[in-house]
Amino acid sequence: MRPVWSGAISFGLVTIPIKVFPATESRNVSLRQIHTADGGRVRYRKVCELDGEQLAQEEIGRGYETATGTLVPITDADLDAMPLPTAKAIEIVAFVPTESIDPIQIGASYYLAAEGVAAKPYELLRRALQRSSKVAVAKFAWHNRERLGLLRVLDDVIVLHAMLWPDEIRSTDQVPVPDVVAVSEEEVIAAVALAETLTGLDMSQMRDEYRAALEEVIAAKVTGERPAAPQPAEPASAQVVDLMSMLEQSVQEAKATRGEPATVHPMPAKKKTAKKVTPAAAAKKAPAKTAAKKPAAKRKPPRSA
């Protein structure tokens, strides 16, 4: 593995020469653009707008476009002459608790390595980070801009995480929030039970199913075979589902996947509240009184003529 940057960690008056190695790698399957009519490769060419000439990489520089459309050339000499103290150093500015860092700020990750005389101060910083249970916030310059970074320990190596500046994080006020909906205590308890059932994930077992499926499709087409037909997805139902039953079913399925016995999570019994009965309703429910039957009147005998 080749280093992508060399510099030093500035830890107070201590300077630690280090090399930076990429901590991650992309495993994406690269797809090229082709001409659908004949399968020819579509390539991009860098052409000057003024003379129409195709340019080589060494002929291309950088510039800043103003609001009026004027391009101001910016050379490497201009960038190197900038009074930036972090140009060749990762300058630690503070040690903070890990939980104070919002994960939304964290970006690409790099491993820092030290050799020779730098090994001792490197080990000193590593142990200080471990014993303090904190992370170090740092500033460093890379790719022609100053960046915010985070130093922490992973195994026996110091890791540098590139971070976004606070003003690069958009406010959540810009996100539309749905109307307030009523959620019962029973539903919350069921959701927590599902979360507890799904606890204990082994991240090393996670697999990119999409990439694996795409690789199978490519392998089949290379050998002239027809890719396997996908399983038809069940259409989404527009009917309102019982959220409680769906949560309970999810708990049972999660336990079955983990080989655990399917047990119903105890739900608190719903309290029965006495219903108010209005006089009119009471009158309707009351048994109807049967009217007392009067004795039949005796018929008078007919008069004789």
Image (cartoon, grey):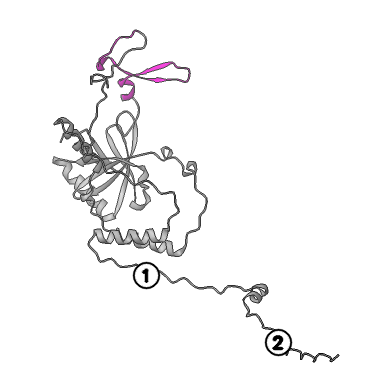
Local packing at callout 2 (Cα closer than 10 Å; few below 14, some 14-19, many 20+) is few
Q: CA distance from mark 2 to mark 1?
A: 58 Å
Q: Which mark is residue 293?
A: 2
Residue pushed farthest top? Answer: 51
235 w.r.t. 60: above or below: below
Amino acid type of the residue tagged 2 in the rendering? Lys
Is residue 195 part of the magenta span, yes or no? no
Q: Magenta segment range?
A: 51-79
What quarter of the picture does the N terminus occupy?
Answer: top left
Local packing at callout 1 (Cα closer than 10 Å; few below 14, some 14-19, many 20+) is few
Number of numbered discs visible in the structure rendering: 2
Q: Say which residue label 1 marks.
A: 266
Amino acid type of the residue tagged 1 in the rendering? Pro
Residue 196 at x, y = what percent? 32, 61
Regarding residue 123, the answer to whether it shows in the image is: yes
In the figure, residue 214 lies in which quadrant? top left
Which tag, 2 or 1, sits closer to the chain's start? 1
